[in-house]
Image: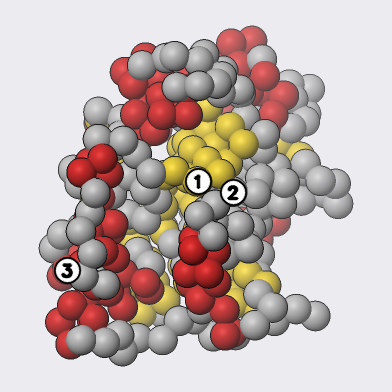
């Protein structure tokens, strides 16, 4: 099934069920008003939502309406946890190579991960508001999963059973703030503003055979200012699958229902497939030419992130955002 959250003036919005083709929707009123309620009581509530989803797709739902991504908040507007990995080691290799640094051996066996703000996510069509263009505004096209409860000590394969939903993410980065923050030895903070997510989150069965080995084997498309810049394969080159990322968190603590885990920037060794963040393009330019030539985003720039199934249909809807100055 496919789920979204509509804006209603509250912090958590209203849960809606969305048709498979993303054309119609139906409020989940009477089952659950918020997605977190469903995640907290998944085994009881999700079958009821599935029934509504089946009725919607069959044209038998009582009060359907046209689905409008502009009305969407993030599927889970605020979460108990947002932990973002760097599961595509090629991205790390490029960044390191551009500054003539080696990739530590541990990076290939132990996932990189940071914990970002989870109290104020952006909807798929909300502006990305940044205090200054000089901060080095960048998009990052990613895949993310929403979990149920996963116990401390759970292994990678068993952790896959804790995945409830999949969605896309734009993990906005302020690149020019990152070096000073990392130099403190304590990780990202101000350099990682609010993250945006796709209009809908989907259950694993919606992915069909594209979901394999804890990875989504489809192409992630990034379009910057109307120009397609990334057609990156999200599957084979994901070094750490989502079960491994969740198990990494579970090494010392429980993961609770409503946690979101990100893949990090989707990245491929074949440069012809483009890029899922500007920083990676700049690294490639530095490796080839000795210096970067592509500038970061400016006010008024747009970014569109989307993934289609093998039949060419949009799976999650598109993240479509503009970069804006504070009002």
Q: Which residue is mark 1?
A: 114
Q: Quadrant of residue 324?
A: bottom right
Query: Label 2 neighbourhood size at 10 Å, few (<14), some (14-19), many (20+)?
Result: some
Q: Is residue 211 left or right of residue 31?
A: left
- Residue ID at (77%, 30%): 33
Q: Is residue 185 above or below residue 82?
A: below
**Where's residue 100, x and y in %?**
21, 70
- Secondary structure under tag 2 reads loop
Give how far apart the Cα atoms at labels 1 and 2 are: 6 Å
Which residue ends up furthest to the right in the rendered image? Answer: 9
- Residue ID at (32%, 54%): 266
Answer with mark 3 or mark 1, whichever residue precedes in sequence.
1
- Cβ–Cβ under 8 Å for marks 3 and 2: no
Residue 24 visible in image: no
Q: Is residue 148 above or below residue 18?
A: above
- Residue ID at (20%, 59%): 102
Q: Which residue is mark 2?
A: 116
Q: Is residue 321 above or below residue 219?
A: below
- Cβ–Cβ under 8 Å for marks 1 and 2: yes
Q: Which residue is mark 3?
A: 271
Residue situated in front as seen by the camera: 114 or 35: 114
Q: Split into 4 quadrants, where in the image is the C terminus?
A: bottom right
């Amino acid at each position: 099934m496919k789920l979204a959250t509509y804006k209603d003036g509250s912090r958590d919005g209203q849960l809606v069920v969305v048709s498979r083709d993303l054309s119609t929707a139906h409020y989940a009123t009477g089952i659950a008003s918020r997605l977190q309620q469903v995640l907290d009581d998944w085994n009881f509530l999700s079958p009821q939502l599935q029934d509504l989803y089946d009725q919607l797709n069959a044209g038998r739902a009582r009060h359907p309406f046209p689905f409008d991504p502009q009305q969407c908040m993030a599927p889970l507007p605020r979460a108990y946890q947002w932990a973002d990995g760097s599961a595509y080691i090629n991205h790390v290799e490029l960044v390191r190579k551009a500054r003539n640094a080696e990739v530590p051996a541990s990076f290939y066996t132990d996932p990189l991960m940071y914990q970002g703000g989870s109290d104020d996510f952006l909807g798929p069509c909300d502006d990305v508001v940044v205090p200054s263009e000089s901060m080095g505004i960048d998009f990052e096209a990613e895949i993310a999963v929403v979990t149920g409860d996963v116990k401390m000590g759970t292994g990678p394969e068993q952790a896959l059973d804790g995945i409830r939903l999949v969605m896309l993410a734009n993990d906005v980065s302020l690149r020019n703030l990152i070096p000073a923050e990392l130099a403190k030895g304590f990780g990202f903070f101000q350099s990682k503003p609010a993250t945006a997510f796709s209009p809908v989150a989907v259950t694993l069965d919606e992915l069909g055979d594209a979901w394999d080995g804890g990875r989504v084997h489809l192409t992630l498309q990034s379009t910057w200012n109307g120009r397609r810049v990334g057609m990156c394969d999200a599957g084979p080159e994901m070094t750490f699958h989502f079960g491994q990322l969740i198990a990494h968190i579970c090494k010392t603590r429980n993961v609770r229902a409503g946690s979101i885990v990100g893949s990090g920037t989707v990245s491929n060794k074949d440069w012809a497939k483009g890029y899922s963040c500007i920083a990676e393009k700049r690294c490639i330019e530095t490796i080839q030419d000795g210096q970067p030539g592509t500038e970061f985003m400016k006010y008024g720039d747009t970014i569109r992130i989307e993934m289609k199934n093998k039949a060419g249909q949009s799976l999650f809807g598109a993240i479509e955002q503009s970069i804006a100055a504070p009002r």
